Structure formats: C-alpha cells, structure tokens
Image (spheres, rainbow, N blue to C red):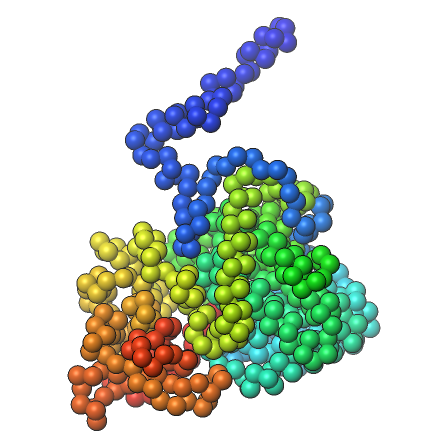
Amino acid sequence: MTMESIMTATNFAAEFAATEEEWRRAAETALKGRPLDSVLSHRTIDGVSVDAIAPRAAPRAVAGRPAGAPWIAMTRIDLADPAQANAQALEDLHNGATGLSLTLAGQGIGQGLRIESLSDLDRTLDGVLLDLAPIHLDLAPYEGRIAAAMLAALVERRGLAPASVKALFGVDLLRDLSRTGALARAWPDMRRRFAGVAEDIGARGFTSPVVLADSRVVHCAGASEIQELATVLASATEHVRAMIDHGFTLEAAAGQIAFAFACDAQQFASIAKLRAARLLWARWREEAGLAPGPVHVHAETSRRMMTQRDAHTNMVRTTIAAFAAGVGGADSIVVLPYTHAFGASDADSRRLARNAQSIILEESNAYRVADPAAGAGAIELLTDKFAEAGWRTFREIERQGGLFEALRSGFWGLRRGPPALGRRDAGPQAEHRLLQIGAGQRLVQTRHVPMRLRNGEIVIAAREHERHAAARKLLSQLEDGLVVEVDVEQREVRRAGGQQFARLIDAAARPDRFAAERRHDSFHVGGDQELILHDQNLPAGERQILGRRHASCSPSSPWPRGNWMVARSPSTSNSSEVAAPSS
C-alpha cells in the first residue's frame, strides 16, 4: 500500500467543513432551526458577552505561575478535633496533596477546626513538614491576629527558618465585615492592629503575604465576575493604605497582598476571571509607580454551585472548576468534596476531591504550559472585557472613599453591587433564581419562579408582586421567626419566613403603605443613622418594626438604596437585631 493510499484511507477530516461559514451552515442544520447564536454566545449578569468562538488572538502570556511549575494542590481540613484533622492531613499529603487549607472554626462558623492553643495547632500539624507543605489559614471572622501569631510561634518552636515556610495568613478585614455585618472594634483601631500583625510577621522573617483579598464571600452572595474582581482590588487597596499609614513603604505593603477567588463550572468565565485579576494587579502597580511584581492567586471551587439533589453531579462541576482554575493560572487550588453542601464530608468524598486535582495535574499536564489560554480568541476577549469593566467598577468604589466606606454606606452591599451593576434589568436570567426553604430539598417549578428548597434559608428574586403567589402559599405553612432580608430598591425579598413573608412582599410592591423612618444609631459601623421600616396602616402604638437598615441615605427618598435586615416575626419577637447570614 502506497503512502498516498494510506492518507486517502485515513483522511477522517475530509467531510468536515473547511471554513467557519461552512461549519456554521452545517451546525444550523444540525440544530434543526434553533438559532446558532443562542448556543455559541450568552451574556453574564453584567451584560458582558461571552462568545464560544472568536478569531485567534495574538499570543499574550499573562505573567503568573511559572511554566512547568504545578500549582499547590491543597485539601480542605475542617474536622473539629485536632487529632482527627491531623490524621486527615497526613492521609491527604501521603496521597497526592501538596498543601493544606486549614478551615478554622470561630464565632458564627459552625464547622471547622477548633484551635484554642498552640498545642492544638501543633497536634493538628504533627508530622507535617511545614517547609515543604504550604499552609492556607481559612479564618473565622476577625481571628487573623491570633491565628497568624500561633502559626508563627509553631514555626519558631520547630526551629524552622520562617522564610522557608510558605503560608497564606488569610487576613481580610473587609471580607469579615461583609460576612458579619459589623466590626469587632472601631475601624481605626482595627487598621492599626492589622498593620501591627503584618509588621510582626515580617519582622519574624516570613516572606509570605499576610493579606488575602478574598472574593469568595461576595461570590457566594451572588456577585458577578466583575464585582468579584473589583472587590478584591478595592480590599487590597484598603489594606495597603492601612499599612502605609502605619509605617510601611508602598513596595513592602503591596508585597503583603494575595488574592482568593471562587471558580465555578462556567469554565471560560473562571479562566478569564483569574487572568483578568493578574492584569488588574499589574495595572494597579503601574498606577502606584511600582515595577511589575507577582501576586499569589488562591482558588477554591465554588460553594454556590453545589447541590444536594443528585450530589454526585457536583464531582463534574468541581472538576471543571478546578481545571479552569489551573488553566487560569492559580498558584494554589482547593477542590471542595462533592458532599460539601450537606456539611461535614466523609472519607470517600475527600478522597475523590483530592484525586480530581491529581488527575488534572498528572494526566492533563495543564500546568506544563505557561498560561495555556494565551492566544485563544474567546478567552482573550473575555479576559480583556472583565479587566476593563473590573477596573471601572473598582474606580467607582474608590470614588465612594474606598471599600470600607462603600460597605458602610450600603453602596457595595453583601448581596448586591452598586446601582450601575444592579440586577434589575437582568432579563431572562432573572427567571433562574433560587428559593430555599426547609430541612429537606425538592424542586418546585412554577410558570414564573423556579424554586429550590433546602437548608432552612429562603432566597427569592422574582421581580413582580403577582409572581409570588406560589411562594407565599408555600411559605405560609412555615413557622414564623426566620431571618428576613428585603431589598426595597430592587423590590426583592431574599430571606423570609411564615406569615411575615406576605407583608414583606407588600412592602416591596406597595411603597405607599410601608414607610421608612430615621432613628439615630450609635453602635453600628461608623455610628450612622438607623432607618426603621414599618406599616403605616397600623396605629402608631401598634406598629411593629419590620426591619432596620444602617446606612447613609437621602431623607427625601422613602425607599433608600441598599439591603434591609428585617426583624423576626412580630409573633415571636419585637427585636430586629439579627445576625448577617454566614457565607
């Protein structure tokens, strides 16, 4: 047989379209009338077009993880008992993991490793070579000072050179503020104490970053990719300012910054988000007059994409997310066990999460190429869109006085971004929100509002009053007294329970009946005034406080922008002090 006949016999591509135009015609024929654009393109919640096909771009490697250097495959250690946590850590490290993410329990964090002394931490990391296995401290709110001091003391106890230990100390004061809704102490005092921690860690000889500007909380709360990028950049800027105000040079302060992101099963968007983060940090350093410098990017598979229904499908989601994080240039990655949505994970789910990274690293070899997405037209285009919009949004936050002021004023809330990035005009995507209720889980589909029920939390984002009929009927069977949150500007009820739900729907849909009244507040962030929501139809002496909000608002507006933390049901309590939902 001649070479020509062999080539003819094996010319498998002969029947495929030779040009994009021919391919599109063939694809439209296969779709039987369905528009091809609906398959190849969609828009994010911010209106950014995500195209699956785009012309090849000129190769432009985004500087990040060095070529040929594998990312740190971390595993989540969240078992409460130090001895059990140690056994899990050693098993992971002996079977493919190269680092540990210690999820620490604390106030408002029910699940996690309980470390109450240096001996507890030593017992947890017994047998772990700290100069070989990097550590990430996934902190409970406002626990960074203590956790960092204990890890530094453990390194000294073991006689290791601090510079040889790679650690993410995980401090982000503004993430903690978003998570809890309140400060542990006055903001100037917190800035001073944080700068003292950073100075002490550096003085001991550590070269690892103290700050982990973390977008995972806002991601879990529903933020878009652009809002996540703006959040981490604004948080990093606030922490740099705090360090400079307390004696750091700009270069030294910038060197204390690392980023943390959640990556979900939207593969292109997750890759582009991490690449855009590095472009934004390079731009930030350029604007600050600094030479280009690296930034550690930590990634964790998304919690908000996890399901309890058919939980094994989470393995597909987390694998896609981990691959996207690796291709996007993450320096360290945590894959959550597929049973994470149920709470504590068993040994099998932890093993599968660990093995997912091993397979991606050792079988796909994605890490062997510096920036594998470079030159891919669709991803390059999306990276630039995210970076440009992220920078604009970051500047909007800065015009508010920085991220702390934006959070304090309500401009940048836990569950929504600024008005320019609001979700009121989300279009068809508004039909895909979740309603979560009760201990069990089942899926209820209505013509207007798809509802998912789970975990005692109630979330709904339908837009019109009449769309809530099915939800109100369902919720009327629940007991009163659940925490409620309503966004009066966007007329959304996001958290509710029992009979009070119907009244809150009315509050969102009929502002003529419900009124906001100012009261002075001296205990919340910044000592702002307090806005009280009540029903005008009731006599003044019988009015129950439906909710309150702490923020600067125009007294001329009956419906100030921002979120309302709404009180417990009047039938159970007249107190409206409720804790912000945990991430």
Q: Is residue 471 above or below residue 50?
A: below
- For the question of whether residue 140 can be seen, the reply is no
Image location (x, y in percent) of residue 578: 39, 82
Where residue 177 appears, as percent x and y from the top left, is 51, 76
Q: Would residue 497 be found to the left or right of residue 282 on screen?
A: left
Q: Identify the image quadrant of residue 233.
A: bottom right
Quadrant including the N terminus: top right
Q: Compared to 551, does 355 lie above or below?
A: above
**Which of these two is toward me, 88 or 12?**
12
The answer to whether residue 176 is above or below residue 443 is below
> Which of the two residues, 567 or 273, is positioned nearer the viewer here?
273
Q: Is residue 566 visible?
A: yes
Which quadrant would residue 364 be assigned to in this image? Answer: top right
Tell me the residue at 40%/45% (across/down). 42
Give coordinates of residue 10: x percent, y percent: 55, 16
On screen, residue 255 versus residue 333, left or right, reads right
Q: How many marks?
A: 0
Left/right of residue 205 with respect to residue 120 in the rendered view = right
Instruction: Name the residue located 37 percent from the left edge and 56 percent from the top edge.
Output: 309
Say which residue appears at 54% left-offset and 39% top-offset. Answer: 377
Q: Residue at x 38, y 79 (%)?
A: 553
Among all residues in the image, which is located at the extreme top? 1
- 246 or 197, nearer to the observer: 246
Instruction: Please give left or right for residue 299 compared with residue 310 in the image.
Output: right
Across and down, in percent, residue 218 comes to 48, 65
